[in-house]
C-alpha cells in the first residue's frame, strides 16, 4: 500500500469515526429523556433477539475462536473469547436482569430547603456518550450496551479484533431491541473495523465522547490512560488475594481457596496469591497446597511452602505482583492479619481480596484497612462480578478511587445535577 493510499484510508476512517461520534451524541440526547419503559422494552427485546439468534452467534464465535487458535492466542484468552449455548443464554439472561433493574435516571439522591426558601435537589443523570474499548470477551458487547442503555447513555463499542465476528452478531441483536422500542439505533454502535487506529481516534474525540472505559490487559489499560484526552474509568489488573487467618475454619478455607483460584482461572476475580497465617502453618498450609496441586494448579511458594511438596516451585519477587490468569498461584506465610494487610496493600491491584476467619474483629480490620474495591469475609473472590452483586451485569471492576469503584453497573454510569426551585428569590 502506498503512502497516499494509507493517508486516504486514515482520512476515511477518521470521517467514519466522527460520523459515529456525532450520531452517538444525538442518540444520547434522546436517551437522556427516554422513558424507563422504553428502555426496558429495548433491553427485553434485545435479550429475546440474542436467544432467537443464538445459533448464529455461536457460529460467528466459532470463526473467531478458530482464528485465535491459528494465531496462537493463549489458552486463558481463548477461554474468555469462547461462547457456547450456555454462555449465550447467560448473555440474554443478563440483559433481562438489567431490564429488571430500577432506572437510575431521575432518582433523587438528596433534597433540602435553604433558609431563603430555595428548594434544592440532587438528581441522577446519564453521563452522556461512553466509549468502551475491550479485548477478547464478546459478552462485554451485550453487558456494556445494556448497562449504558439502562442508565440513559449512548455508547461506542470497540471490541477486540479477536472477537470481531462474535461482537457484530451480538450488536445486531442489540440494534433489534432498540428498533423494537423506537429508540435511536445509534445509541449502541460497534466500531466496524479492526484497525487499531480507531482506538486512538476514540481517545481524542472529547467533543463526542464523555468517558472512556477500557477493559482488557495491562498494555491496553496503559495505552488508554496515556493517550486519552477524555476522562478514563479504569479497570486495572485483578491481582486478588485469599488470606487464611489463624482463626479460619480449615474446611471452609479449603473450599474457598480452591474455588477462588480454580472455578475460572481467566477471570479478573480469580485469586492469584494465597496468604496463610504463620500460626496455623502446621495445620492449614499443607492441605490447602495439596488441594490446589490436586486440582491441577501450579503452586509457587515461599521457602516453607516449598518444603511441603516437591511439585511446589520457588516463588520469585515478581510472582507476588502478577495476575497469572491461569492455573498458577503464589503462596506465602504471613504474620497474622497485620502481615496480610501489609502484603495485600503493597502487592495487590486494589481489585478484590478476601479473609477467611472466625474472628470477627480480624475480619472487620482486614475489610477496613485493605485498600481494594471489593473486600470479602468468608467468601470466594470469584464473587467479584456485577451479576453476583445484583447489577445484572457489569462493564468491569473499577480500581479507581474517583467516581466509581468496584463493579460498574448501571447506577455507576450516571452522574448528577442540581435542580433548584425558587419562588422569585434574588441574591442580595
Image (spheres, grey):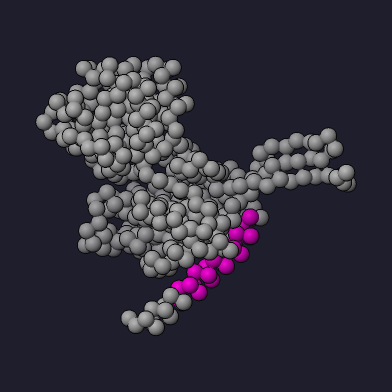
Please state, as top left, top right, bottom left or bottom right, where the C terminus lies in the image.
top right
Q: Left of 240 or right of it: where is 171?
A: right
Please state, as top left, top right, bottom left or bottom right, where the N terminus lies in the image.
bottom left
Q: Is residue 346 above or below residue 133?
A: above
Q: Is residue 373 above or below residue 201?
A: above
Main secondary structure along the magenta-highlighted residues: helix
Q: Left of 2 or right of it: where is 311?
A: left
Q: Left of 182 or right of it: where is 286?
A: left
- Percent position (x, y) of residue 74? 24, 53
- Percent position (x, y) of residue 312? 16, 32
Residue 335 can be seen in this image: yes
Q: Quadrant of residue 69?
A: bottom left
- Percent position (x, y) of residue 213? 47, 52
Q: Is residue 407 above or below residue 89?
A: above
Seen from the viewer's position, the closer of residues 55 and 205 is 205
Q: Residue at x 64, y 60 (%)?
A: 29
Seen from the viewer's position, the closer of residues 300 and 165 is 300
Residue 84 can be seen in this image: no
Q: Residue at x 47, y 39 (%)?
A: 406
Q: Is residue 28 magenta?
A: yes
Q: How many marks?
A: 0
Q: Is residue 239 magenta?
A: no
Q: Residue at x 38, y 55 (%)?
A: 220
Seen from the viewer's position, the closer of residues 49 and 340 is 340
Residue occupying the far left of the picture = 310
- Percent position (x, y) of residue 185? 54, 64
The span shown in magenta is 12-32
Q: Quadrant of residue 246?
A: top left
Q: Residue at x 44, y 33 (%)?
A: 371
Seen from the viewer's position, the closer of residues 194 and 102 is 194
Amino acid at each position: 500500500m502506498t503512502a497516499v493510499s494509507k493517508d486516504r484510508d486514515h482520512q476515511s476512517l477518521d470521517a467514519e469515526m466522527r460520523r459515529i461520534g456525532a450520531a452517538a451524541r444525538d442518540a444520547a440526547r434522546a436517551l437522556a429523556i427516554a422513558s424507563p419503559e422504553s428502555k426496558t422494552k429495548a433491553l427485553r427485546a434485545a435479550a429475546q433477539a440474542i436467544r432467537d439468534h443464538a445459533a448464529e452467534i455461536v457460529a460467528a464465535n466459532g470463526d473467531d475462536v478458530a482464528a485465535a487458535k491459528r494465531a496462537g492466542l493463549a489458552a486463558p484468552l481463548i477461554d474468555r473469547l469462547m461462547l457456547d449455548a450456555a454462555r449465550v443464554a447467560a448473555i440474554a439472561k443478563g440483559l433481562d436482569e438489567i431490564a429488571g433493574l430500577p432506572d437510575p435516571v431521575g432518582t433523587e439522591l438528596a433534597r433540602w430547603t435553604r433558609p431563603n426558601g430555595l428548594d434544592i435537589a440532587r438528581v441522577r443523570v446519564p453521563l452522556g456518550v461512553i466509549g468502551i474499548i475491550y479485548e477478547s470477551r464478546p459478552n462485554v458487547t451485550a453487558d456494556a450496551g445494556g448497562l449504558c442503555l439502562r442508565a440513559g447513555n449512548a455508547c461506542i463499542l470497540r471490541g477486540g479484533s479477536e472477537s470481531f465476528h462474535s461482537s457484530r452478531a451480538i450488536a445486531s441483536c442489540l440494534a433489534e431491541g432498540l428498533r423494537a422500542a423506537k429508540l435511536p439505533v445509534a445509541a449502541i454502535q460497534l466500531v466496524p473495523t479492526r484497525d487499531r487506529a480507531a482506538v486512538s481516534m476514540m481517545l481524542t474525540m472529547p467533543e463526542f465522547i464523555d468517558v472512556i472505559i477500557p477493559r482488557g490487559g495491562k498494555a491496553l489499560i496503559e495505552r488508554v490512560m496515556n493517550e486519552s484526552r477524555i476522562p478514563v474509568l479504569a479497570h486495572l489488573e485483578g491481582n486478588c488475594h485469599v488470606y487464611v487467618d489463624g482463626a479460619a475454619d480449615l474446611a471452609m478455607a479449603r473450599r474457598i481457596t480452591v474455588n477462588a483460584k480454580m472455578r475460572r482461572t481467566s477471570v479478573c476475580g480469580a485469586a492469584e496469591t494465597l496468604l496463610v497465617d504463620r500460626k496455623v502453618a502446621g495445620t492449614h498450609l499443607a492441605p490447602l497446597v495439596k488441594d490446589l496441586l490436586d486440582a491441577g494448579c501450579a503452586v509457587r511458594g515461599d521457602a516453607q511452602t516449598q518444603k511441603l511438596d516437591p511439585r511446589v516451585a520457588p516463588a520469585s519477587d515478581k510472582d507476588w505482583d502478577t495476575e497469572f490468569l491461569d492455573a498458577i498461584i503464589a503462596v506465602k506465610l504471613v504474620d497474622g492479619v497485620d502481615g496480610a494487610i501489609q502484603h495485600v496493600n503493597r502487592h495487590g491491584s486494589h481489585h478484590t481480596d478476601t479473609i477467611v476467619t472466625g474472628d470477627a474483629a480480624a475480619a472487620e480490620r482486614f475489610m477496613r484497612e485493605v485498600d481494594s474495591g471489593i473486600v470479602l469475609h468468608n467468601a470466594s473472590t470469584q464473587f467479584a462480578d456485577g451479576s453476583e452483586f445484583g447489577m445484572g451485569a457489569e462493564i468491569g471492576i473499577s480500581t479507581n478511587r474517583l467516581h466509581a469503584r468496584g463493579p460498574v453497573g448501571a447506577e455507576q454510569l450516571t452522574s448528577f445535577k442540581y435542580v433548584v426551585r425558587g419562588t422569585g428569590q434574588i441574591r442580595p
